[in-house]
Amino acid sequence: MKFIFNDPTFSLQLLRTIGETYYKCADIGECISTAYRVKEGDFESWYEEWLKTAKRIHQYAEDCLAKNHLTSAKEAYLRASNYYRASGFLLIEPDDPRVLTTLDLSKDCFKKATSLFTYLVEPIQIPYEGTSLPGYFYHAVRGKINQDRKQIDQQQQQLGDNKNTNSNINKNTTTTYPTLIVIGGFDSTLEELYASAAAAAVERGYNCLTFEGPGQGEVIYKKNLPFRYDWEKVVTPISDFVISNQNEFNVDPKRIALMGISMGGYLAARAVAFEPRISAGVLYNGVYDGYDAIQTSFPKELLDALNTGNSEFVNTTLTNLMESDPNVKFNMKHGMRTTGTNSPYELIIGAKNYSVKDILKDIKIPTLVLDAEKEDSFPGQSKKVYDGLVSLPPESKKYILFTEEEGAEEHCQTGALAITHQRVFDWLDEMLNDNS
């Protein structure tokens, strides 16, 4: 699918940004007008134009909040958060201060938006190996009110316009709910997971926990914790956190699902093979082997150099390719930063650790594997993952291929949140209700 741009990186990232319109985190006209101002293939132009749009919408949000137009403010903060994320996306030099600036602005806008939600969204810090991982816990109970809303209530009272009808609702309830834990991927952020999963989860009566782990968002850029292949050691502390707070969060411990998006499909598969407290897994999409995926588009001479350990040839070739191919440039630069590697060769060889070939047989819980007809990041790998689930009976595993006709053929069904969430949550309802 080519959208405005001919370059696949720019096209997909525009589709990724505008796709969040479905949950009011973007607007079509704003995205298209921004895209038409971007010089194709120019990372600086992408940054500058999305930043202009983000700043304008951010100001709308501030103006609306000052005048007590709370719904308008909430929606503008959500859009600004997404546009700041898009602006910083192609800033790939690790010492570029604008990376942290756009990251912080995106996070700040999102936090302000969630303070205006009509249900409870709690910022959380999850204990992890002597530090903590940032996250959000979205409560399933409709009508719960965020504690931050107390300040808004006071502001409304001062203005003589206290329309909040939810402030006296008791947070405590004896009802428990299914809970979805969501793992992002190679380049996702905590805030983006709202549109990717949390909004749909809460609408369907699920709690949802989103977080950033090693290699992602502020965990890599502020805490300098790179990706790790043994992701069960990340999910186990997350599960500990959920279970230890199950009464406070109204969690049904028998109905906890784990979803991994993009590269998160690998991370989630790894986790559910080892974490016994997860009841169902969604691999969105399936990732079988990271090293195989990276090699997919490489010419024979580059593959030969990798296989013979010719690091100099690999590094020189890929450095040259980065000058002409935005996709290679982003993947190499971002990959080295988030994995803590120092060269393209080291990055690619390190990908050999990211494989589920030998652990799929250990997955014993119901598992849904998604795939896309034009998948280009992990082509053909979802089906390999599904076929490798040999310990599951047919009724406990499902493979869904999204098609071009459905407008859902891109990597992770980018731009097709409606049909994706319909199929994911309908399946989860069926699996978790069976386990209740």
Image (cartoon, rainbow, N blue to C red):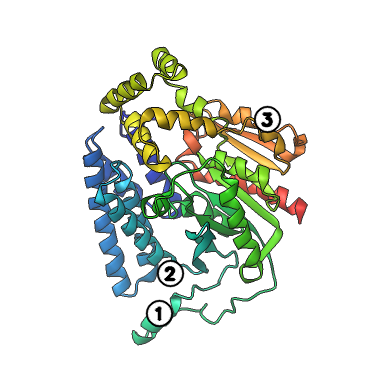
Identify the element where label 2 is drawn. Answer: loop
Q: Position of residue 178 (x, y in %)?
A: 66, 58
Label 1 crowd bin: few (<14), some (14–19), many (20+), radius 10 Å: few
Between 329 and 435, the one nearer to me in the picture: 329
Label located before the other in sequence (1 or 2): 2
Residue linked to disc 1: 151
- Residues at circles 1 and 2 in contact by the CB criterion of under 8 Å: yes
Q: Is residue 42 visible?
A: yes
| Mark number displayed over residue 388 | 3
Residue linked to disc 2: 115
Between 258 and 11, the one nearer to me in the picture: 258
Q: Quadrant of residue 282?
A: top right
Q: Nearer the viewer, mark 2 or mark 3?
A: 3
Between the C-alphas of marks 1 and 3, the distance is: 52 Å
Label 2 crowd bin: few (<14), some (14–19), many (20+), radius 10 Å: many
Between 53 and 106, the one nearer to me in the picture: 106
Q: Position of residue 289 (x, y in %)?
A: 55, 30
* Residue type marked 1: Gln
* Residue type marked 2: Ser
Taking the image as shown, residue 264 lies to the left or right of residue 400, namely left
- Residues at circles 2 and 3 in contact by the CB criterion of under 8 Å: no
* Residue type marked 3: Gly
Q: Position of residue 156 (x, y in %)?
A: 38, 81
